[in-house]
Amino acid sequence: MTVMRKIIFVFLFSYVSFASFAQENITAFEVKNFIGEICTITGKIDNLKIIENDKGGVIFIHFEKPYPNNPCKLVIFGKNRSKFPSNLEEYYEQKTVKITGKITEDKYGNPQIIVNEPSEITLIE
């Protein structure tokens, strides 16, 4: 195989591999159609719910509408809570954000993305 053919082969292989992992850009209302996929979601945060428990708690960040009518949510588990701003409500509520992550379902079948780092959530001005 000539050098040029090798370069073309590597380029085509890289392109096909990248294309197969390309992320969809979707709204919070479309999330339910992309369970199991990695997507970029842009939407407005309606509200947050912080639940305290002996495991460090959990934070639910609801997109577009208040729970239980929200189309999807972000979930921050207690073990990661200290990484995020202490004033989460002020920081995120009623703001538009963008997040890329794997869409999963909670135990009730509702779409969610588990967030481990603040850098995963981008505020959109």
Image: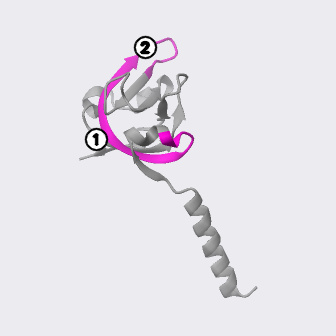
Q: Is 24 positioned to the left or the right of 11 in the image? A: left
The amino acid pointed to by label 2 is: Glu
Vertical comparison of 92 with 25: above or below? above
Pick the residue in front: 103 or 123: 103
The amino acid pointed to by label 1 is: Thr
Residue at image position (52%, 22%) is: 108
Image quadrant of residue 21? bottom right
Residue at image position (47%, 23%) is: 78
Q: Is 26 positioned to the left or the right of 17 in the image? A: left
Residue 37's label in the rendered image is: none
Residue 26: within the magenta?
A: no
Distance between the Cα atoms at labels 1 and 2? 26 Å
Judging by the rendered image, the residue that carries numbered circle 2 is 52
Residue 87 is at least partly visible in this image: no
Disc 1 crowd rating (10 Å Cα; few below 14, some 14-19, many 20+) is some
Secondary-structure class at tag 1:
strand
The magenta segment: 33-58
Q: Is 120 positioned to the left or the right of 44 in the image? A: right
